[in-house]
Image (cartoon, grey):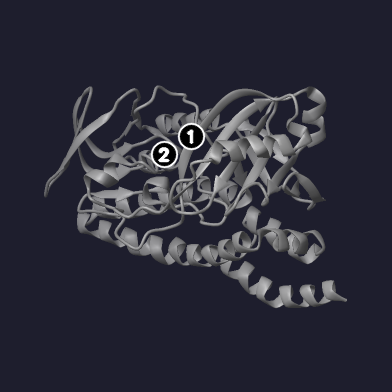
């Protein structure tokens, strides 16, 4: 069968690009290897900037509106803050992702789940996808199939992909523990070297995990998760619902994110920030950029696809360089940074504002450069 655009992958990037194209009359097919809805290992934090970027409301999928944050170090709580505006809206990714896919279908996209891509053939006039259910043709292909993207590998894109690693679990805890956590998101930068642990509240359980923000494997990450759980009282008497390890993009790529008739978006394009590993915003943002480039390419000249990589580099790549600097400081001196944060309301505003998306990483770094020396001097008095 022939389509204008085939999108491989049904996460936020795949669903949003499909929605944006379908509502403009483009004939779109979404191909997803899993049966939907499917469990997705992820903390499920939707930041303010992500909420603003999404082209549709997601209220039906929100489980908890996080009203503040808890910063810990090695399980010891340093401070708890309510910043008077939501830090994040917390969702389960199976429900959230499927909701976005359904909106894309309502807009006119077609879906084939339980369908695995085997090979692709890119030609001058079209691109052919061979799957376990047959062959499909389109003018343009979108690779939205995550950090292990078969589309990227098939097109020889992002050969030196930098990734961290995370292990994430959904755990049930006693009701009193849920009440103790409340609507606060916990961050612990003493949970493991070059990384952090998190606890995100959901409607009837907690999402927890640890993230190692350094390229390469961390063989003992399961042990770090165990130590993280043992160090936090709110996780006492927990029972696992799901547990899963996965790679996390470490922010950007210096090479191309496109070929003659294909574009990579979201995690497939390695678009997650190298500080916290947050990728949902960049999945949505890159999908919206991709949809505009694709519309111009379909209507005018397919060669305009090449504009995509440069737009992403200018829009996102430059911010990732700033995020990498913040990550370098945070992970080289985690205890000192945590203690400075504990004792400075100004720093707390900057960091939680950055998490929310009130400030871009460049603004954050400039503010830290101005404020940290004075804060250090005050702490020495």
Q: Residue at x 33, y 49 (%)?
A: 264
* Apparent side of residue 139 relative to residue 83 in the rendered image (left or right): left
Q: Earlier in the sequence, mark 1 or mark 2?
A: 2
Q: Is residue 302 visible?
A: yes
Where is residue 271? Give x, y as percent: 44, 52
Q: Residue at x 30, y 50 (%)?
A: 263
The N terminus lies in which quarter of the figure? top left
Q: Quadrant of residue 345?
A: bottom right
**Residue that badge 2 annotates:** 19
- Count of residue discs: 2
Percent coordinates x, y for residue 60 in the rendering: 61, 30
The quadrant where residue 234 appears: top right
Q: Residue at 80% across / 64% down in the picture?
A: 344
> Which dot marks residue 230?
none
Residue 56 in view, yes or no: no
Nearer to me, 95 or 21 = 95
Which of the image's four quarters has the C terminus? bottom right
Q: Is residue 321 above or below residue 4?
A: below
- For discs 1 and 2, the disc positioned in front in the rendered view: 1
Mark 1 = which residue?
A: 100
Q: CA distance from mark 1 to mark 2?
A: 8 Å
């Amino acid at each position: 069968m022939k389509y204008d655009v085939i999108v491989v992958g049904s996460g936020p990037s795949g669903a949003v690009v499909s929605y944006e194209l379908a509502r403009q009359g483009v004939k779109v097919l979404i191909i997803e290897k899993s049966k939907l809805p499917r469990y997705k290992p992820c903390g499920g934090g939707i930041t303010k900037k992500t909420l603003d970027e999404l082209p549709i409301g997601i209220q039906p999928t929100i489980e908890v509106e996080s009203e503040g944050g808890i910063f810990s170090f090695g399980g010891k709580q340093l401070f708890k803050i309510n910043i008077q505006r939501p830090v994040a809206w917390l969702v389960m990714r199976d429900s959230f992702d499927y909701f976005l896919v359904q909106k894309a279908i309502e807009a006119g996209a077609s879906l084939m789940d339980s369908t695995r891509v085997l090979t692709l053939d890119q030609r001058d006039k079209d691109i052919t996808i061979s799957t376990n259910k047959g062959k499909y043709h389109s003018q343009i292909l979108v690779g939205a199939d995550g950090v292990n993207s078969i589309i990227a590998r098939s097109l020889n894109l992002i050969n030196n992909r930098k990734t961290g690693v995370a292990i994430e679990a959904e755990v049930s805890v006693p009701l009193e523990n849920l009440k103790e956590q409340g609507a606060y998101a916990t961050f612990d930068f003493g949970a493991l070297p070059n990384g952090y642990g998190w606890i995100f509240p959901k409607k009837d359980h907690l999402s927890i995990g640890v993230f190692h923000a350094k390229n390469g494997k961390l063989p003992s990450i399961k042990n770090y998760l165990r130590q993280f759980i043992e160090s936090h009282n709110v996780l006492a008497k927990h029972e696992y619902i799901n547990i899963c390890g996965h790679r996390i993009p470490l922010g950007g790529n210096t090479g191309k994110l496109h070929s003659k008739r294909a574009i990579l978006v979201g995690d497939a394009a390695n678009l997650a920030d190298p500080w916290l590993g947050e990728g949902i915003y960049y999945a949505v943002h890159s999908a919206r950029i991709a949809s505009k480039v694709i519309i111009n390419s379909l209507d005018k000249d397919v060669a305009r696809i090449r504009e995509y990589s440069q737009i992403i580099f200018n829009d996102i790549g430059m911010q990732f360089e700033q995020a990498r600097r913040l990550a370098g400081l945070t992970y080289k001196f985690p205890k000192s940074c945590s203690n400075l944060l504990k004792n400075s309301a100004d720093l707390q505003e900057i960091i939680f504002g950055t998490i929310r998306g009130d400030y871009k990483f460049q603004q954050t770094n400039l503010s830290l450069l101005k404020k940290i020396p004075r804060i250090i001097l005050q702490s020495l008095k």
